């Protein structure tokens, strides 16, 4: 079995963490009776510099043809002054739109070895295992009009439009309920129905899908701002959180910090399955491009490596192989190895490549 993967390293530390993940792909090809056919292309700022656009049509076609896309990071201060439509982040937004990646899965797990690295007390985060299901192709990031106009007298007026349809809410709700059935069978839906009409539609639609199709799943609703507060007060009360594009962006980053470092957490962005069961998918770490440490060999590769683990589970149906990779990361952390972002007293500090070396050695031991 050979899987076709498109590698999009992007900007900043993206090339470094994707290169380390390529080494993990090599280990699986050599040891697990399946292989990968990989291509690589440009996205983000580096794509703009070469092609004048953060996402070329040719790159999008490759992404549509691949079984999965592994994405690094985009952006950096050198491109901050570009016109909005040319900013590196537009490359990622186009990928999400053109591939129809409407469901973003962001797990927030606290490894036992890192419970002391969180900004919260260890007893609050120990054993934390949350999955945030974020709607990814609707809402305020894509709603029209999106414009800045000049009013009489020279004052500027900027507009972003929050838009949702029942169909968009229905499909993300189904994803959340189906995933909850594989976990603790609990879903919390976060919205702002008290002040936003899209929030009213969101809450009514999620409730209707629950009542009609998933009555066995426990559903509760929460205001998004209260959800943010509860995540730092008592995060283990949550299992699956489903929410819209904007709130999901904010809440998932907050949840990530509970685990000790945003450099630890992966994500998956999934589209709808076609008649043959094929599903477009993009996997990426949720950290940014970190231009301040780019090229220095300091970046934590774990989030990108675990993103590949999500790819094994969700795109390739290889849950045992995904679990093997997660165990390898857990073992390395338990043995006291750390990159700078998760460094603790008494631990052994490693760079980007050395951390991957340790994970590969752990895979060897676990597979022996």
Image: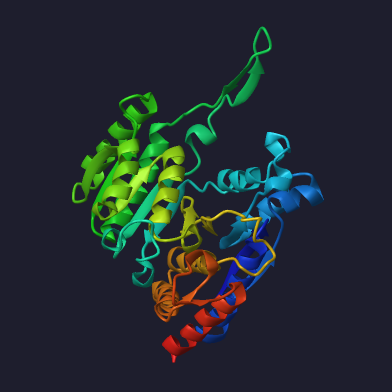
In the image, residue 47 above or below residue 208: below
Image spot of residue 195 (x, y percent): 34, 24
Residue 212 picture quarter: top left
Image spot of residue 200 (x, y percent): 32, 28
Which residue occupies 59% across, 44% down? 93
Image spot of residue 245 (x, y percent): 46, 40
Residue 295 picture quarter: bottom right
Which residue occupies 74% across, 53% down? 46
Q: Is residue 274 visible?
A: no
- The residue nearer to you, when weighing 149 against 127, is 127
In the image, residue 164 above or below residue 77: above
Count how many numbered circles sit on residues in the image: 0
Q: Is residue 159 visible?
A: yes
Image spot of residue 70 (x, y percent): 58, 62
Q: Quadrant of the N terminus?
A: bottom right
Q: Is residue 170 left or right of residue 299?
A: left
Q: Is residue 127 left or right of residue 298?
A: left
- The residue nearer to you, when weighing 339 against 347, is 347
Q: Quadrant of the C terminus?
A: bottom left
Q: In the orientation shown, which residue stands out farthest toward the bottom?
A: 368
Q: In the orientation shown, which residue stands out farthest toward the front?
A: 345
Which residue occupies 43% across, 31% down? 164
What sort of colour scheme is used for the picture?
A: rainbow
């Amino acid at each position: 079995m050979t899987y076709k993967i498109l590698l999009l390293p992007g900007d900043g530390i993206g090339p470094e963490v994707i290169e380390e993940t390529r080494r993990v792909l090599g280990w699986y090809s050599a040891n697990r009776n399946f292989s990968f056919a990989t291509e690589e292309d440009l996205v983000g700022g580096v794509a703009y510099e070469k092609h004048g656009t953060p996402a070329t049509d040719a790159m999008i076609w490759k992404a549509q043809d691949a079984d999965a896309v592994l994405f690094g990071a985009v952006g950096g201060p050198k491109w901050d002054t570009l016109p909005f439509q040319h900013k590196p982040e537009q490359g990622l937004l186009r990928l999400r739109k053109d591939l129809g990646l409407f469901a973003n899965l962001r797990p927030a797990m606290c490894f036992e070895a890192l419970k002391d690295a969180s900004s919260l007390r260890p007893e609050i985060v120990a054993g934390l295992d949350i999955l945030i299901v974020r709607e990814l192709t609707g809402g305020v990031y894509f709603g029209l009009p999106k414009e800045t106009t000049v009013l009489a007298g020279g004052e500027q007026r900027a507009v972003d439009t929050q838009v949702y349809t029942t169909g968009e809410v229905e499909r993300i709700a189904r994803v959340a309920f189906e995933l909850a059935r594989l976990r603790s069978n609990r879903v919390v839906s976060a919205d702002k129905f008290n002040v936003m009409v899209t929030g009213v539609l969101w809450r009514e639609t999620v409730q209707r899908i629950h009542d009609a199709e998933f009555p066995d799943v426990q559903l509760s609703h929460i205001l998004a701002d209260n959800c943010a507060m509860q995540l730092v007060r008592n995060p283990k009360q949550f299992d699956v959180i489903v929410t819209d594009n904007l709130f999901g962006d904010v809440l998932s980053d907050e949840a990530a910090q509970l685990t000790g470092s945003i450099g630890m957490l992966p994500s998956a962005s999934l589209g709808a399955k076609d008649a043959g069961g094929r599903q477009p998918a993009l996997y990426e770490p949720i950290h940014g491009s970190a231009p301040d440490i780019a090229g220095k060999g300091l970046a934590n590769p774990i989030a990108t490596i675990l993103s590949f683990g999500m790819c094994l589970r969700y795109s390739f149906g290889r849950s045992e192989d995904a679990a093997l990779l997660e165990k390898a990361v857990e073992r390395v952390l338990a043995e006291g190895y750390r990159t700078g972002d998760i460094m603790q007293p008494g631990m052994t500090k490693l760079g980007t490549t050395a951390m991957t070396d340790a994970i590969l050695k752990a895979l060897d031991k676990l597979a022996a």
